[in-house]
Amino acid sequence: MKNKKPVILAITGGISLTSYNRKILNTLKVNYKLTCDMTIYDEIIRFPFFDSGISEEGTPDIIKEFLGEVKRADGILICSPEYVFSIPGVLKNALEWAVSSVVFTDKPVAVITAASVGQKAHESLLLVLKTIGAKLTDDTSLLISGVKGKVSLEGEICDEETDIALQNLMHSFLESIS
């Protein structure tokens, strides 16, 4: 990775256009545009429900495209809210489609859970990612509880401790890719 910027595929579990998670990813994309090429992947809302009985030939094209994007990326950045003490269904569904592949195996992944509380979703998301073989460390995992008091409606990180934690996460994540 010495001569080219790493390619980051960013996925949000918050599908609303006003999601704090989307705002965090947009802010990181702008703040790190000189050090990485980040694409925010918005298609998981269009995914059909995961069906373990589908053959590889029967896998929907949108899923094949998604798995290809994951495979091509140097790293995956996931930023997700907590819904009913768990991972949002659309994000869990997207990750389930990767179960029968190896696209996440040893892939550097950073996880941000930004929610009112978020602990249960964060734990669950880390467990799912470990199950599919993602390369995670404590330094590439961040829980932002009380997100509404730490990120403005415009997406500005307005809490100094959170801003530093995000910088540290991105530094560790980009370092894990190189």
Image: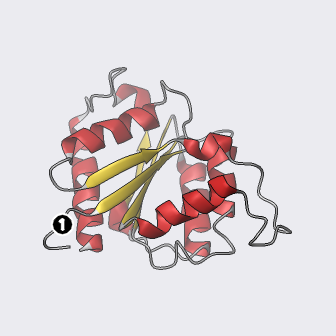
Expressed as whole percent of the image width and height from the top left, the position of residue 62 reads: 64, 53
Q: Is residue 110 left or right of residue 99?
A: left
Q: Is residue 135 left or right of residue 49?
A: left
**Is residue 88 among what the camera can see?**
no
Task: Answer yes or no: is residue 95 visible.
Answer: yes
Residue 36 against residue 172 in the figure, above or below: above
Left or right: 103 with respect to 93? Answer: left
Q: Nearer the viewer, residue 72 or 117?
A: 72
Position in image of residue 165 (x %, y %): 27, 50
> What residue does disc 1 label?
4
151 relative to 35, above or below: above
Q: Residue at x 60, y 73 (%)?
A: 132
Residue at the right extreme, as displayed: 53
Q: Position of residue 154 (x, y in %)?
A: 32, 21
Instruction: Work out whether residue 71 or residue 143 is closer to the camera in this orientation and state it.
Output: 71
At mark 1, the secondary structure is: loop
Q: Quadrant of the image for the C terminus?
A: bottom left
Q: Residues within 10 Å of mark 1 (few under 14, many from 20)?
A: few
